[in-house]
Image: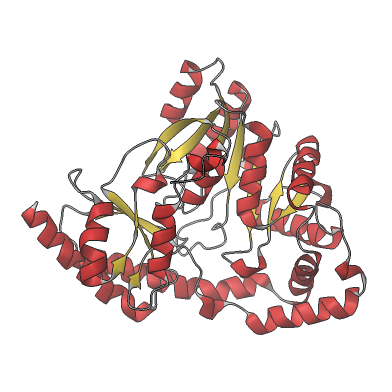
């Protein structure tokens, strides 16, 4: 039982399920399809080390000093140029805020817009880390179901029309590219429509895009922000998936007045991100070709994804369906509604097969859906993917036959 002197936002939030999952994920006897980690064999460790050394040499003593809450101009200028290159949206250094990973950006934007009870539209399912951030602000959730081409925009518009009062939707959180946890990509038509709806119904969009650079097949799609002509989209990205999560560097792009407020909120939270890390990243991006590094990673992740999808096709019973992502780190497994995959994993898979995945329940904010699961392939050794899926399928078949 939690200390009753704790704030309600702490007492009401249960992090035990995820904490247990990630403990089990790190257990070497388990085959873990649970983590959302990049493959650490792909980190450019030598280049990052050199960048830190060079940053220390070049920027002493200023590297040890406070800096602008938005982050050093040198890094923001580089990121503004990259944002134009990667999205076609022209921004300046003054339009960017450096954050401690994408996670802090999500928290700051939610804090900027959401009072207790305010409407927050999210995809169902969605990134569990975002849900943990949202819970602190006690929103009214509008959970929008996912379809094969992204969130159900018709349902979103129906909710916008039906709720125009105190609980109206003020913010939409979406992961349009290779969504966590489903791996689904939002169609271009839906991206354009979301930008239009935001202006029409007076809400804002948090476009979370940590996986955009990790496309393995198909054609890259324009960002939602590229269709935004009314400053309704706040764009968030991160270096956690394409470089190293240990750097804890993300950034957000927003209209100037919003960015001023967000920088103030960040300053109140942590004053600034670590100057040494930000200047080292600027050094890395100046002296290395990030796109070449990404190009080296993509075939490795693509092969892991391909092996997992083929193994699922080969071994899974017909009652189990799954998404086939064009990029990113995850795919989504769906079983018959009678299945409780949280119970299945804890009672059967973990003790008998030593297999871990993320059950669907904690990935929904307001729905009690238990027959789905997220499978990760990015951090699983290639040689373990097919045997792990084959074993998983064996237990699924036995469980379905007896239930």
Q: Position of residue 314 (x, y in %)?
A: 20, 67
Residue 248 percent location from the top left of the image: 65, 63
In the picture provided, is 63 more to the left or to the right than 348?
Answer: right
Image position, residue 4 (x, y; %): 52, 39
Q: Is residue 390 visible?
A: no
- Between 94 and 362, the one lying in front of the other is 362
Residue 272, can we see it?
A: yes
Residue ID at (79%, 69%): 276
Question: How has the structure been colored for display?
Answer: secondary structure
Please determine whether, in this image, residue 234 is positioned above or below residue 274: above
Q: Residue furthest left?
A: 402
Tally of numbered tags = 0
On the image, the x and y values in percent for residue 66 come to 87, 60
Position of residue 382 relative to residue 193, above or below, is: below
| Residue at 70%, 31% in the rendered image | 230
- Residue furthest right in the image: 61
Left or right of 137? Residue 125 is left
- Who is closer to the viewer here, 87 or 134? 134
Which residue is at a point 81% across and 40% down the rendered structure image?
A: 260
């Amino acid at each position: 039982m939690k200390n009753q002197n704790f704030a309600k936002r702490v007492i009401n939030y249960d992090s035990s399920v995820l904490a247990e999952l990630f403990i089990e994920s790190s257990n070497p006897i388990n085959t873990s399809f649970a983590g959302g980690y990049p493959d650490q064999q792909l980190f450019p460790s030598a280049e990052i080390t050199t960048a830190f050394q060079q940053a220390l040499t070049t920027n002493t003593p200023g590297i040890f000093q406070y800096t602008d809450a938005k982050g050093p101009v040198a890094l923001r200028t580089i990121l503004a140029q990259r944002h134009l290159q990667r999205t076609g949206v022209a921004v300046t250094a003054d339009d960017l805020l450096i954050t401690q990973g994408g996670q802090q950006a999500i928290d700051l934007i939610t804090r900027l817009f959401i009072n207790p009870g305010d409407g927050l539209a999210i995809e169902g399912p969605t990134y569990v880390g975002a849900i943990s951030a949202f819970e602190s602000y006690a929103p009214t959730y509008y959970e929008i179901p996912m379809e094969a081409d992204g969130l159900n925009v018709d349902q979103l518009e129906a909710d916008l029309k039906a709720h125009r009062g105190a609980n109206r939707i003020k913010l939409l959180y979406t992961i349009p590219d290779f969504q966590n946890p489903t791996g689904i990509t939002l169609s271009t038509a839906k991206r354009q429509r979301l930008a239009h709806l935001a202006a029409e119904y007076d809400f804002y969009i948090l476009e979370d895009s940590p996986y955009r650079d990790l496309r393995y097949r198909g054609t890259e799609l324009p960002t939602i922000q590229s269709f935004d002509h009314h400053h309704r989209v706040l764009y968030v990205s991160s270096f956690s998936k394409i470089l190293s999560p240990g750097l804890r560097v993300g950034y957000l792009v927003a209209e100037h007045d919003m960015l001023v407020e967000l920088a103030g909120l960040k300053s109140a939270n942590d004053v600034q991100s670590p100057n040494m890390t930000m200047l080292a990243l600027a050094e890395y991006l100046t002296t290395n070709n990030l796109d070449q590094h990404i190009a080296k990673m993509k075939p490795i992740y693509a092969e892991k994804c391909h092996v997992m999808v083929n193994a699922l096709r080969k071994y899974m019973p017909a009652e189990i369906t799954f998404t086939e992502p064009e990029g990113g780190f995850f795919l989504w497994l769906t079983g018959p509604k009678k299945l409780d995959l949280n119970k299945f994993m804890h009672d059967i898979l973990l003790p008998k097969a030593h297999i871990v995945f993320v059950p669907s329940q904690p990935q929904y904010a307001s729905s009690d859906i238990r027959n789905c699961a997220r499978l990760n392939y990015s951090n699983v050794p290639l040689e373990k993917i097919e045997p792990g899926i084959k074993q998983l399928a064996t237990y699924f078949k036995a469980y379905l036959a007896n239930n």
